[in-house]
Image (tube, rainbow, N blue to C red):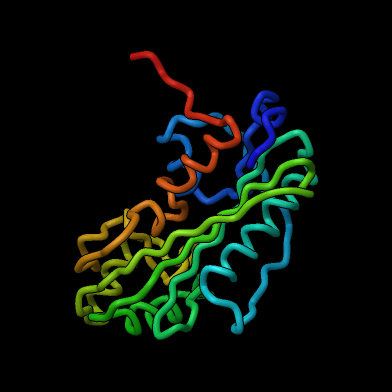
Amino acid sequence: MVMDSLSQARQPLVLASQSPRRVELMTEAGFEFQIVVPDVEEAYDASLTPEALTVENARRKAVAGAQMHPDALVIGADTLVYVDGIPLGKPKDMEEALQMLRQLSGRAHEVCTGVYLAHSGGTQGRGLHGVTHVIFQTLSDDQIRAYHAKVNPLDKAGAYGIQECGEMILSSYDGSWTNVMGLPMEHLVEALAEFGVVPVLVSP
């Protein structure tokens, strides 16, 4: 349980990510926050489950951010696309992006986002995660290139963004839409409330 003193302190909220999609989700949810981009080395451990690996990488980012802002509650996040149990990160170039969507074409895959909330300078915190099952349309190379002409795949795990021209590639999904974007907001909002952090209500 989160200490009452921590909730009452109304500590600043920090997002340890410069992802435009995560910034958008937090802003649209009504939170006030700062952004930091800590330089951390991510884990690549095939022995870890998707949930454990993404939460571990989120923890590294959050702890590094909390060390920079010891008075703040810091959110770290990491998203990976998994197909056949193999993680797909961000493509290194357009050819790899094409290959990734070829691999996902006409198939189901999972998107896992791990989140970690660090406080007390990174000495304490808690993790959470979300998993969404996604099914793609069967895509030709021309369709993939047409999609990538509209959406930059190089900064996105799995070489796609569900919120950008998703109708060009998506068949169906089961689970959290925002989780695929980079934050499982349904879980995150509840977790933040435990720390006394709630959205700021904006008057109409």
Residue extending farthest to the top is 203
Give above or below for 62 relative to 73. below
Counting from the top left corner in percent of width and height, residue 118 is at 69, 47
**In the picture provided, is 13 more to the left or to the right than 104?**
right
**In the picture provided, is 134 more to the left or to the right than 10?**
left
Q: Residue at x 51, y 73 (%)?
A: 50
- Figure disc tally: 0
Counting from the top left corner in percent of width and height, residue 100 is at 40, 79
Counting from the top left corner in percent of width and height, residue 43 is at 67, 72
Q: Nearer the viewer, residue 138 or 15?
A: 15
Counting from the top left corner in percent of width and height, residue 66 is at 74, 45
**In the picture provided, is 60 more to the left or to the right than 83?**
right
Q: Residue at x 76, y 33 (%)?
A: 71
Classify the position of the N terminus by image quarter: top right
Q: Nearer the viewer, residue 145 or 138?
A: 138
Q: Quadrant of residue 153?
A: bottom left
Q: Quadrant of residue 133?
A: bottom left
Q: Residue at x 64, y 77 (%)?
A: 44
Classify the position of the C terminus by image quarter: top left
Give above or below for 164 relative to 198. below
Residue extending farthest to the front is 1
